[in-house]
Image (tube, grey):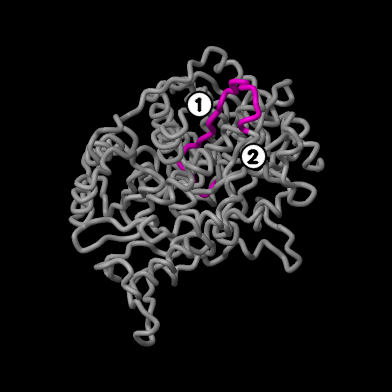
């Protein structure tokens, strides 16, 4: 690895803005965004088909594309989310790519990094303590335990914490209430960090955090509780984005880590602004499949930042397409032409969704050693009918930047005349119900939306409070375009169920829950913790 000062130097960032955290990682002071001549970098958004047990390699492709652009003489920066400890020790493993297209130092980025997640957790749980204290001491007249909506967070996947009772053991331990924990990546404060433009915007968004309601329906905010200053004390250093490097030494900015299926799944606006000032191409990604990450990137992040992608890369694999065609993981390596044709409905639908925003698409075929030439050729021929502007094979896992040259050249070609303009699926001033209906029909392929009584009641309440003019951040399964994880391919003509509705006013979006979505995952029977030895070495293939 290069010393982090060398990486900073390669970007022409003034050394005064570098805040080193050891030899190989650093924060870059947010003021570095003010000290740049705009290069008008082209923002490339990497998304994927609906995830499968095969693993599609979206982060690996993002890093490999950055390396590939460097191989053809382009100045590029990877701009990615921070990994979360829960998935690292759970089912997913790390979030730093794989093979010869990784972020380094891999172990430090995955474990603790520069402490941003800990700061978010501390601020979130501090607010929870202040809320409970306010109820206990009755500092806001009428604010009782039954009106509290603010939960706590942990970065460990622990199903036993999903629903708990606090304050037991007597009146002095109160307030007694039913509550629960979410994972840190689901914290509204994490989403706020990702969407804030600067420290002033961070403070403003924190002040709008709704922690509960009075009996008359009036929201209680963090500002009402005088909690904004204390939270800012904990969060003030998290505003500075983190600088690391790829396996081949290209710069990478890693900042904020909201979940893709619960929150909006994108790295920070500040990171985009920083990278755009020091590179020609900024490669960023959005969590999970295009029905989640891409759609939220467009409707939430670009509306907050005003920065539009010049093109979108959709990552596919032969194995994942076969999985959507009904093939079980044990049979991924077996050729199956019929399943490949059937499963192609998934990427075909998502390409159509991306193009409906008016953006050009390059499809990356992330090759696996078990893929046959015949299968790759068949997928290529299917993609030729999809309307995608470009197709490229990628071998970045095995070959690093050299394996990403074809993809890099395709991206450069289709962005030559990119206008950077988009067509949104819904106007921001549409009703909550209309926005959800448009997403359900246009993105999820549903025929109808079925609202639970509690979700409809909350929708009416949020509308009365003047919150209807916010974008939608759908919380749903990442394993299907629909609201049911077992519906593979491109399901259509079904009922899309909204079970609950939340309002993330600080982040600036309405948060519907589709089906049975969990904000606190649980550990699987064989968690990835088993791939980390007693010395802290990462043994698994991340």
Quickly name the residue at label 1.
309
- Residue 251 spot, x, y in % from top left: 71, 35
Q: Residue furthest bottom?
A: 170
- Residue 467 spot, x, y in % from top left: 27, 44
Q: Nearer the viewer, residue 216 or 103?
A: 216
Q: Against 532, is 426 above or below?
A: above
Q: Residue at x 62, y 44 (%)?
A: 240
Answer whether residue 343 is visible to the viewer in this image.
no
Quickly name the residue at label 2.
253
Compared across the picture, whether 137 is left or right of 437 comes to right
Q: Residue furthest top?
A: 417
Q: Which residues are magenta?
A: 33-54
Neighbour class for label 2 at 10 Å: few (<14), some, many (≥20)?
many
Answer whether residue 359 is visible to the viewer in this image.
yes
Q: Nearer the viewer, residue 189 or 517?
A: 189
Q: Nearer the viewer, residue 363 or 258?
A: 258
Going from N to C along the chain, the mark reached first, 1 or 2, is 2
Q: Nearer the viewer, residue 360 or 336?
A: 360
- Residue 227 spot, x, y in % from top left: 44, 59
């Amino acid at each position: 690895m290069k010393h982090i000062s060398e990486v900073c130097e390669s970007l022409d960032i003034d050394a005064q803005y570098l805040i080193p955290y050891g030899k190989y990682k650093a924060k870059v002071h947010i003021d570095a965004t003010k000290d740049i001549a705009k290069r008008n970098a082209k923002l490339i958004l990497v998304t994927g088909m609906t995830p499968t047990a095969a693993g599609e390699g979206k982060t690996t492709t993002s890093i490999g594309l950055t390396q590939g652009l460097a191989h053809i003489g382009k100045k590029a920066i990877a701009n990615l989310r921070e990994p979360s400890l829960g998935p690292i020790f759970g089912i997913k493993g790390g979030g730093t790519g794989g093979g010869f297209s990784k972020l380094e130092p891999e172990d430090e980025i995955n474990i603790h990094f520069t402490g941003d997640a800990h700061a978010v957790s501390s601020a979130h749980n501090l607010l929870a303590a202040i809320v409970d204290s306010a109820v206990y001491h009755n500092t806001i007249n009428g604010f009782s335990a039954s009106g509290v909506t603010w939960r706590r967070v942990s970065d460990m996947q622990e199903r036993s914490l999903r629903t708990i009772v606090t304050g037991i053991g007597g009146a002095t331990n109160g307030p007694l209430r039913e509550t629960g924990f979410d994972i840190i990546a689901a914290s509204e404060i994490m989403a706020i960090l990702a969407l804030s433009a600067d420290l002033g915007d961070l403070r403003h968004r924190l002040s709008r955090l709704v922690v509960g309601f009075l009996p008359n329906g009036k929201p209680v905010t963090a500002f009402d509780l005088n909690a904004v200053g204390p939270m800012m004390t904990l969060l003030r250093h998290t505003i500075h984005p983190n600088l690391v490097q790829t396996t081949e030494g290209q710069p990478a900015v890693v900042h904020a880590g909201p979940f893709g299926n619960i929150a909006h799944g994108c790295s920070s606006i500040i990171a985009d602004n920083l990278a755009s000032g020091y590179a020609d191409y900024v490669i960023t990604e959005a969590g999970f499949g295009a029905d989640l990450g891409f759609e939220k990137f467009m409707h939430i992040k670009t509306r907050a930042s005003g920065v539009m992608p010049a093109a979108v890369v959709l990552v596919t694999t032969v194995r994942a397409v076969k999985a959507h065609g009904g093939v079980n993981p044990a049979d991924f390596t077996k050729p199956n032409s019929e399943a490949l044709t059937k499963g192609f409905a998934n990427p075909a639908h998502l390409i159509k969704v991306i193009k409906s925003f008016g953006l050009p698409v390059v499809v990356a075929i992330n090759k696996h050693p078990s893929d046959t030439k015949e299968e790759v050729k068949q997928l290529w021929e299917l993609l030729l009918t999809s309307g995608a502007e470009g197709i490229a094979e990628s071998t970045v896992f095995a070959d690093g930047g050299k394996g990403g040259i074809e993809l890099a050249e395709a991206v450069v070609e289709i962005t030559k005349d990119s206008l950077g303009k988009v067509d949104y699926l819904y106007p921001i001033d549409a009703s909550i119900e209309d926005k959800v209906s448009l997403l359900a029909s246009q993105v999820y392929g549903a025929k109808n939306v079925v609202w639970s009584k509690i979700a409809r009641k909350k929708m009416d309440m949020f509308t009365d409070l003047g919150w209807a003019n916010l974008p939608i951040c759908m919380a749903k399964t990442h394993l299907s375009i629909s609201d049911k994880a077992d519906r593979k391919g491109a399901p259509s003509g079904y009922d899309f169920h909204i079970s609950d509705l939340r309002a993330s006013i600080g982040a600036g979006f309405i948060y519907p829950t589709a089906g049975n979505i969990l904000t606190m995952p649980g550990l699987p029977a064989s968690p990835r913790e088993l791939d980390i030895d007693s010395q802290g070495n990462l043994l698994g293939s991340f």
